[in-house]
Structure formats: structure tokens, C-alpha cells
Amino acid sequence: MIYKYDGIGEKCPLPLINLRLLLKKMQVGDECIIRINDVGSLNDIPKLLDKQGYQHSKKNLGNGTVEISISI
């Protein structure tokens, strides 16, 4: 299953909290795609994913917006 979350315009910690909720739902083979542009979230979310061992990649979409793809 592919989960999508658009956190553009939301301030930290809301994107981080919503991502944690999505990660709890995910199972092996699922993917999550999130879009964020808050500076705090851009720093905190990759740190969380690294710490918890999730594979992820970032793509800059312009205007300070980043798309992060997470797979389990």
C-alpha cells in the first residue's frame, strides 16, 4: 500500500506526529510519500527515519519543499 501525506504549510511538530502515525500503520512492502516545507520538519524527520532504521530518499521539489519516500 502507498500512504501519502501532504504536510506543506504545517509547522513542526505536526508533520512529525502525523508521520509517526503513518509509520505505525505500515507493513512490509508498503511505501509512504510525504511532502514537507517546514525547516524543523526537514531536519527532524530524516533524523527520526535514520534512528529507527527506515530506508528513505529525499527529492527537492523547489520553493523549499521536499518529498521524502519511505519504504519498509
Image (cartoon, rainbow, N blue to C red):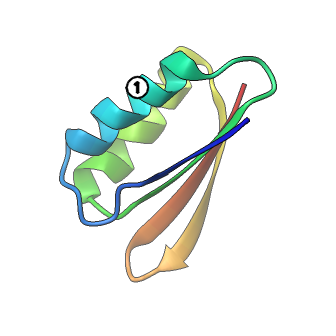
Kind of residue at disc 1: Arg
Please indicate whether residue 67 sits to the left or right of residue 54 in the image: left
| Direction front: furthest residue | 1
Please indicate whether residue 31 sits to the left or right of residue 66 in the image: right
| Direction right: furthest residue | 29
Residue 62, how many percent across, how many down? 48, 81
Residue 10, how many percent across, how many down? 23, 57
Residue at horizontal 24%, vertical 49%? Answer: 40
Please indicate whether residue 36 sits to the left or right of residue 50 in the image: left
Q: Is residue 62 above or below residue 6?
A: below
10 Å neighbourhood of mark 1: few (<14), some, or many (≥20)?
some
Task: Name the foreground residue: 26 vs 62.
Answer: 26
Residue 34, how many percent across, how many down? 51, 51
- Residue on which disc 1 sits: 20
Residue at horizontal 73%, vertical 30%? Answer: 30
Residue 25, how many percent across, how many down? 55, 20
Q: Quadrant of residue 2?
A: top right
Q: Tally the numbered discs.
A: 1
